[in-house]
Amino acid sequence: PSASFFTTFISWETKKNEPMKNNLYTIHEMELVYIPKHSLSQKPKLHSSFEVANLLKDLYNPNTIHCQEEFIVLYLSNSNSVIGTQKLSKGGMTSTVVDVRLIMSTALKSLSTGIILSHNHPSGKREPSELDKKLTTKIKEAGKLLDISLLDHVIMTPDNGYFSFADEGLI
């Protein structure tokens, strides 16, 4: 981002019957500039959970997928081309921290219209926990406010198995 500066006068009343005071403040004006390194035509386009899982298996560390949870987000264009990926967090054996604000701020900055969530279950269990379901709903609702669609949440297992919330009608 680049920053430029502008100056403004701010007036306020301090006490009853006292004259207004003018003070000079400098406020930073920010401009967000997004310059993609490659055109979207060079990015993979996702059509199914199978394609998503194939892309994701290369993003997880094969040395830790069986012992440490990780949360990854795929950011997509309106045509489902992958704009980018984010390894959001790495946790312990049974959980990892997910900050919805970080997901949405990255989606906004990258001009994404859709996101796909993913995390792994080191235990090999493919089915989502109740916490997985609640988190998915929370992120979906946050995305609705910003017109960012949650397209899927894919749980990966160490044996390259996966569970798709979209395929199971849970999105």
Image: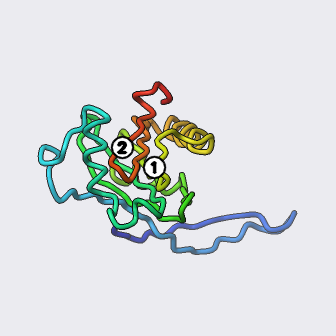
Q: Quadrant of residue 35?
A: bottom left
Tell which residue pokes out farthest to the left in this image: 42
> Which numbered marker is on residue 124?
1
Residue 4 pos. (x, y %): 37, 70
Residue 109 pos. (x, y %): 37, 54
**Disc 1 or 2, which lies upstream in sequence?**
1
Q: Amino acid at mark 2?
A: Gly
- Looking at the picture, tell me which residue is in the foreground, 37 or 29: 37
Residue at screen point 31% across, 43% down: 53
Q: Amino acid at mark 1?
A: Gly
- Please say if 147 is above or below 54: above
Marks 1 & 2, CB-CB < 8 Å contact: yes
Tag 2, which secondary structure? loop
Q: Specify few, some or many for label 2: CA neighbours under 10 Å numbering under 14, 14-19, or 20 or more.
A: some
Q: Which residue is mark 2?
A: 161
Q: Specify few, some or many for label 1: CA neighbours under 10 Å numbering under 14, 14-19, or 20 or more.
A: some
